[in-house]
Amino acid sequence: MGKLYGVIGDPIAHSLSPAMHNDAFSSLGINAHYQAFHVNRENLPAAIKGMKAIGVAGFNVTIPHKTAIIPLLDEVDPLATAIGAVNTVVNINGRFIGYNTDGEGFIRGLHEEYGQPVLDKRILIIGAGGAARAIYYTFGQQGAKQVDIANRTPDNALQLKESCPYLVETAAFTMEEAERNLANYDIIIQTTSIGMSPKVNASPLQLTNIRSDAFLSDIIYNPAETFIMKEAKKHGARVQNGMKMFAYQGALAFEKWTGTYADPKRMMKIVQERLGG
Ligand code: ATR
């Protein structure tokens, strides 16, 4: 009998994870199946109990359960505990262990596209929500030198900065301040939902002062080229979208489940095909 993996979330119907992971299982000759499960907030505790009872081998967790799942797990790894969010659960001898591969997935994808080490660069994160938190803490854990945060609500940026358990030089800015200081940054990371389909003609920053040798990474992958990416390109900057982050967080989850590193390029191709690009 093959092993069962999956993803829980609400909404979940359009998740690209089943296509990505099922392709990885079959291409690596692993007898397993990955299934999307629609679980609403109210049913989360029952769903976790049920998944344990039927011996689900591992699963991903997405909106809105990444934080709510923590007290329902048997153990949570230190980085995921600090982030306060779990996106990957592994069943080890009947115990559910939680991890977060979002930040590491992001940094691997960034490093690959950027083409040189990123930890000593001057980095600006736009946004202070869940995704920003995973990326910021993982940068901190990996020893990044300077990662500043700009956010619409400055208090949220300050809170993120002050709650980080890892040593990292950080300033928290308003969007206006960030706009003025943009020329200071080698890498700018867009983590808000601004520009996501269907409201594609929106951008959190104007980018007037972005440098032509800067790199802009947007974690959005639908649309494949966001408004802010287009603007950055007009200034000569290099850009990337969120597809690599998505593929790498998946490849890292897959490795935790199976001990095998799935090919992220193949995973990305599946995502690209599904998005029609
Ligand atoms: P996620 O978990 O996907 O990161 P989130 O936790 O809801 O999403 O975080 C959303 C982020 O996008 C926040 O930084 C939010 O800014 P605030 O802290 O001021 O709320 C930012 N954001 C969302 N909509 C925005 C908008 N219209 N303009 C500026 N920032 C916005």
Image: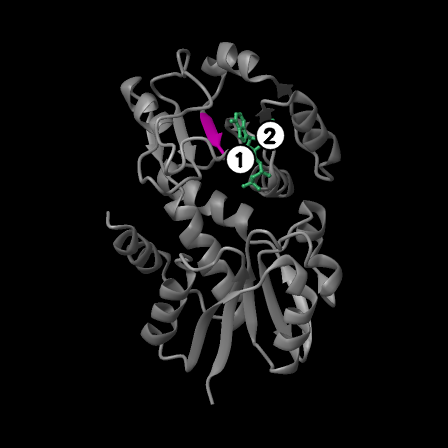
* Relative vertical location of residue 181 with respect to residue 80 in this rendering, above or below: above
User: Where residue 183 sits: x, y (%)?
Assistant: 45, 14
Residue found at the far top of this picture: 180
Extent of the magenta region: 187-191
Do the residues under discs 2 and 1 have CB atoms within 8 angstroms?
Answer: yes
Q: Earlier in the sequence, mark 2 or mark 1?
A: 1
Report the front residue among 56 and 168.
56
Where residue 145 is drawn, which disc sits there?
A: 2
Q: Residue at x 67, y 50 (%)?
A: 79
**Residue extending furthest bottom?**
1
Secondary structure that dominates the magenta span = strand
210 to the left or right of 7: left
Tag shown at residue 119: 1
- Residue 54, given in percent of the width and then of the height, sits at 60, 82
Task: Name the amino acid, label 1.
Answer: Leu
Count residues near mark 2 (Cα–Cα under 10 Å), then give few for <14, some for 14-19, many for 20+: some
Tell me, yes or no, whether the highlighted magenta stretch contains residue 188.
yes
Look at the image and say whether residue 40 sits in the magenta stretch.
no
